[in-house]
Amino acid sequence: MFVAIRDLRFAKGRFALMGAVVALITLLVVLLSGLTVGLGRGNTSAVTNLTADHLVFEAPPAGQKLDFTTSSVGPSVRASWSHVPGVRRAEPVVVSMTRASGGGRTTAVAVFAVPDGSSLAPGGVNGAGEAGAPGGVAADRVVLSAGAAAALDVTAGDRIDLDGQSVTVGEVSGTDEFSHAPVVWAATANAPASGLEPGHATFLALTTGDAERPAAGAEGADGADGSAGVGSDAGANLGADLAAADQRLGTVTLTPAESVSAIGSFSSENGSLQLMRALLFAISALVIGAFFTVWTVQRSGEIAILKAVGASTRYLLGDALGQALVLLLVGTALGSAVAAAVGSVITATVGSAVPFVLDLPTLLVPVVVMTVLGLAGAAFSLRTVTTVDPLTALGSSR
Amino acid sequence: MTLQLDDITLTYPDGTQRVTALERVSLTAQPGTLTAVTGPSGSGKSSLLAVAATLIAPDSGRVLLDGRDLSGLSPKETAAVRRERIGIVFQSSNLLASLTALDQLLVIAHLNGTPLSVAHPRATELLAAVGMGDCVGRRPHQLSGGQRQRVTIARGLMNDPRLLLVDEPTSALDSQRGEAIVQLLRRLTVERDLTTLMVTHDERHLQAADRVTHVVDGTLRRLADR
Ligand SMILES: Nc1ncnc2c1ncn2[C@@H]1O[C@H](COP(=O)(O)OP(=O)(O)OP(=O)(O)O)[C@@H](O)[C@H]1O
Ligand SMILES: [Mg+2]
């Protein structure tokens, strides 16, 4: 790094310019990442926070994508699922987007309708409700997420209008959101008209575990399938059992995390944000690659001199990569520091109005990716370092 | 260190043909002697130095340092030989733009892993010896052509070489400075028992040499032993 450090100091202007470009791209990427995570949470947190191991959807027709808005799981399928080995509970969840009004305001909400007293809903004895309060959902008793309560300006005990039905706010719990709408947890009886046939659910929330495995069910289940795997290796069998049941019942079983891609607004939004991020990464790698290629070609005469006086190629490569690394580390550190400052100003001033999440991964992942890709870009210029002929140092052409 | 060039032929690619720069050249230089190489422009003087410096492998013939044949060495090994044993002073003063005069010498020490506590006094002393003691902190663009050449000479001596190869050391200097440089090279050659090969155009410098060889069209003619 003897020459590299002195080059950095000598060609301050050029490196400062390049460092500023790296810092700006890092700033953009970190802000974009924070926005991606924030928007993602606003779209999916109700699903990813579900206290279920797997979600069962109706298999979409060939050529169509799985989607929360089109999936419809009937009562017989649910009954069959509850008898699948390894499945302890298969609870129907009806998801619908509707309007709620109360406290003189109206807001769009996502209603997650679950059976009375289900532990899928927050609050109640199972959830995070206030101690002693009668929690959970029941007929005409809903649980509001903090967002919904704030939007309607209501608290526990108030009455709200949910798609034409008057229900009581039993409790305010959690910050769940779905498809950018705050979530209202309701009992199945209060599920708003969602276009589903009566008795059908959007998906089934499975609770699995081999503690109390029910015996093979009567309906639909062929005996061999039902009794398979009892008492043996649970994990592997569970996967096989679920897959077999999917096949048999025409369903698709996903983990909550996997199922977020079935939220239409999430996959399109997340897709374009990730594409933008990938493009920024690619641009930064290219820009850095171009900069170092030009820089290296420009100083190929000096590389020849160093080779002529006995510098090994390895020494020169280390010098070149070290220089790129310093530039990248300084640039990304600066960029992410500014991004962190901007992020905390955003969260402090506009708060939840801008869905922006600034945590360590959102800060560090771009820094690491930028550094690695930048080095890869800089590595393009290394060919010049290896191919320069030391003989050219002797020539009088310089 | 004895330098022995044995029946060297060197050609360069020239379009579809090859141009012969050196033809069956043999030369031996002993430690403690200064060998001057003269000849018209384009006759092959720099090429001769390049072969001796292991910067280019000849088409045929051998280069021996103290009897050790360098022909079969890898680029990595020849780089080590240059780093440790050979001092090169280029025809045009080839300095690194971002380095001060002092750093131009220290980088050589850095390549060899010499600690700064040893390298720093040595570099200062060498710069003083070439009359550059006052300009140690200047970068090449702040030096005159002759001053750059003197830094280049000091740099060539930094690794305490056994073989010193000098290409036109005085081309950018006035005759007085030029003469001083040649006298310095002569003194160092004797004091440090260097094997020195010096290419020069200047007839006046020839009397400082122990031996003068004349290159004409890629072949050597020995002119004088002193
Ligand atoms: N890299 C090269 N590629 C092709 N031909 C070359 C190359 N270097 C030198 N030559 C040719 O080899 C011959 C010898 O060149 P060299 O540089 O050794 O001459 P020189 O005696 O040092 O000349 P000068 O006194 O002008 O420095 C010349 O004809 C030159 O054109
Ligand atoms: Mg020459």
Image (cartoon, coloured by chain):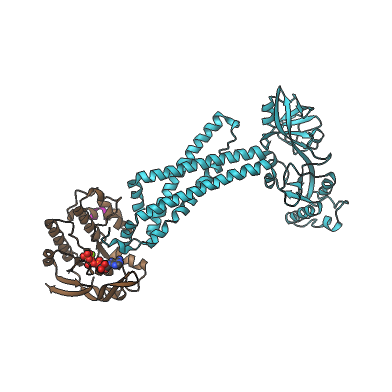
Q: Is residue A256 left or right of residue A329?
A: right
Shade of chain A as shown in the rendered figure = cyan
The quarter holding residue B171 reads bottom left
Q: Residue at x 74, y 41 (%)?
A: A69
**What residue sits 69% from the left and 42% below the top?**
A263
Across and down, in percent, residue A155 comes to 71, 25
The magenta stretch is: B118-122
Residue most extreme to the front: B16
Residue B121 in the magenta stretch? The answer is: yes
- Of A218 and B177, the residue lying toward us: B177
Q: Position of residue B67 (x, y in %)?
A: 27, 75
- Answer whether residue A231 is magenta in the image: no
Name the dominant secondary structure of the magenta segment. Answer: helix
- Residue A41 shown left or right of residue B154 in the figure: right
Quadrant housing residue B41? bottom left
Q: What hue represents chain B? A: brown
Position of A147 compared to A337: left or right? Answer: right
Residue occupying the point 13% across, 67% down: B206
- Give the number of callouts: 0
Q: Is residue B117 visible?
A: no
The C terminus of chain A, quarter of image: bottom left
Q: In the image shown, does B213 or A52 lie closer to the viewer?
A: B213
Horizontally, residue A277 falls left or right of residue A99, namely left
Q: Farthest right residue?
A: A218
